[in-house]
Every structure is written in C-alpha cells, then in structure tokens.
DNA sequence: ACTATATATGCCAATAGGTGCATGTAGGCG
DNA sequence: CGCCTACATGCACCTATTGGCATATATAGT
C-alpha cells in the first residue's frame, strides 16, 4: 500500500484520533497509563492503537524503565504538515473531555515523570483531588 | 462514528486518494468515464468510490444528461482546509501518471464537455493521438 | 417505442480491521 | 532469586470493507 493511504488508514479510527489529539494539545511525551486514564479505554487498546500509529510512522516511543513514553514523530516534514493540519481540523471542541482528563492526570507527575501507573479510578480521582488541594 | 474519523476513512483507500488527486490538479468537474480512463480502473469501482467520497461530504455530483460531473465540495470551510492540506501532502510526485492520463483524456472534450464515454483503450489512444496532431 | 450508452447498485466471496480476554515480556526492587 | 508492575501481544470472534461480476436505471437519439 502507498504510504499516504496507510497514514490515512491510521487516522481512520476514532480512538487513534483521540490519542493524536492528546499529543497535539500536550507537547510532552505521554506514557501509556496516562493515555489510558485520559481516554478511559482498556490498556491493551491503547497499546495496540499506539503500535498502529508507530507503524504508520506518526509516533515515536522511548523506553524509560518500564514506562514507555510516546510522542509525535515530528522530524519528517510530511508529518509536521499533517500535524499542523490535524490541529486545526480537529478543532478545540472535539475530545474536550479527553483533554481535561489528561490535564488532571498530568498533575500527578513528579519532576515531569509519570509515577502513578495503573490504579482504580476511585483511587485516581482521590489522588487528583489531593494534588489539587496541595497546589492551590 | 465521529465525522472526523469517517472522513479519514474515506481517505484511507488509495483509489479514492487518486480520485481526489485528480480533482486537486484539475479544478474542473470530471465525469466518471474520464476518471475511469485516467486511473484505469473498472467503471463500477470508480462509481462506488465516488459514492463513498460523496457520502463523506467531500464530493458533489451534478447530472448533465447521462453524464455525471463530480467535483470537490469546497463550500465547507473544513473541506477547504482539508483539500489545501491534501494538495501539499500528496505532493507532485505521487500519481504522476494519473495526472498525465487525465490531461490526455481532457483533450477529447469539446466546448468543455465530455463527449467520449467508454471506448476500448486502443480507440482511446488513437483518438488522443489524432487530437494532439490537430492541436499542434 | 426501441436502442445505445453513461452511470449506479445489489450480491457474493475474500480480506482486513477492531474488540475483548488472557497471557507474555521486561525492567525495578527487595 | 522472586515478585510486582508497566506494557506488549497472540488468539478468537465479529464486523466492516473491497473487488468482481452482473444487472438495473436513466437519459439521449432515432
């Protein structure tokens, strides 16, 4: 298959668009558990979709211990063109909730690194509440 | 499905990208037989893919007798954004041959309208040769 | 009305893609 | 070494998509 059509195939799934959207509104690399909590999808889904995005050449991975930090692959000019288009095309109204969830989740980082992993939602919301109180 | 992902689904097929590319390099509306000759795909494929592009809101159709003239639907701002992106993204090197085939095929138009329909390839090339000699 | 032709579409088989579940892998830490 | 944890992946099932063929539709010309 031509590379162009396989790139659009990678974009043709809503979950993958939501993942890309997270990268577009937050320039930092994100680890899988943060993406899972932002999108509220099972971990295996996030991993699989990230693999597809990686195979399409859109995403890079960098291991840091057991954490895997994913980010947009911007070193190719075609990708930069695509990402800046995507940012306008997706607009600010789509996936607003994902964005909010991600922002909350990123509050739990320490020194810019994810230290939480997978916890039950109840624990997660409690952690976030506590963190908010501390920082206010 | 969200509208964004369904648009990318429409773009995720190489034949459909080739069709859109024809519209991007040639602003005039094109009829199905011209697309068929440019891409060298069966007529039913062209029709089906055009229908998918139409359902995705990317293409408009206007009947003129038995001919169906298709063109990009540019009256929506999201589409214009998409098309200008696509034009850069597809670049000038992809689908070069399609572009040449289309240009040849368009030589056979008379007063801006398609008058040829479906003919065997041998006849088509002969018609084009003759036309070239006349116009030189 | 009949025919020719440009286009659309219904049906089938083959294939691809997504989800869910379970399990595997690999790094950190005691 | 052994356990915990973050992440990856193989398998089964289901659904969606595509190509091919035949045929339907619709309009023009005679």
Image (cartoon, coloured by chain):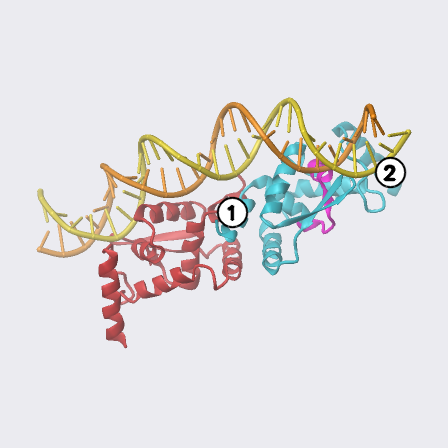
Chain colours: A cyan, B red, C yellow, D orange
> Is residue B103 placed above or below B75 in the rendered structure?
below
Quadrant for residue B102, please give it. bottom left
Q: Residues within 10 Å of mark 1 (few under 14, many from 20)?
A: many
As drawn, A115 above or below D27: above
Q: B46 left or right of A62?
A: left
> What number is the disc on residue B107?
none
Structural crowding at the residue carrying mark 2, measured as other residues with C-alpha within 10 Å and reported as few (<14), some (14–19) or many (≥20): few
The quarter of the image holding the C terminus of chain A is: top right
**Gap in angstroms between the C-alphas marked 1 and 2:** 42 Å
> Position of B62 compared to C26: left or right?
left
Residue drawn at the location 59% of the way across and 42% of the way down = A52
Q: Horizontal and vertical percent for residue B17?
A: 45, 53
* Chain at numbered mark 1: B
Q: Quadrant of residue A107?
A: top right
On the question of residue B17 being in view, the answer is yes
Dots 1 and 2: beta carbons under 8 Å?
Answer: no
> Does residue A136 show up?
no
Q: Position of residue D26 (x, y in %)?
A: 24, 46
Q: Residue furthest bottom?
A: B136
Magenta includes A30?
yes
Query: Is residue A1 on the magenta stretch?
Result: no
Local SS, label 1: helix
Residue at the image position 62 percent from the left and 50 percent from the top: A58
Checking the image for residue A133, the label placed there is 2
| Residue B8 disc label | 1
**B119 vs A122, nearest the viewer:** B119
Q: Nearer the viewer, residue B75 or B130?
A: B130
In the rendered structure, the answer to whether residue C29 lies left or right of residue B63 reads: right
> What chain does badge 2 belong to?
A
Marks 1 and 2 share the same chain: no
User: What segment carries the magenta color?
Assistant: A24-37
């Amino acid at each position: 298959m031509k590379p162009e059509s396989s790139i659009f195939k990678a974009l043709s799934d809503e979950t993958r668009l939501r993942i890309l959207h997270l990268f577009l509104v937050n320039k930092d690399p994100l680890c899988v558990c943060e993406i899972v909590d932002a999108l509220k999808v099972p971990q295996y889904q996030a991993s699989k979709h990230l693999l597809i995005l990686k195979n399409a050449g859109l995403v890079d991975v960098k291991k840091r211990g057991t954490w895997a930090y994913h980010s947009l692959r911007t070193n190719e000019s075609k990708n930069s063109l695509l990402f800046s288009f995507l940012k306008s095309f997706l607009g600010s109204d789509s996936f607003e909730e994902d964005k909010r969830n991600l922002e909350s989740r990123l509050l739990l980082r320490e020194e810019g690194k994810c230290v939480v992993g997978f916890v039950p939602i109840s624990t997660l919301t409690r952690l976030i509440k506590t963190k908010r109180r501390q920082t206010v």
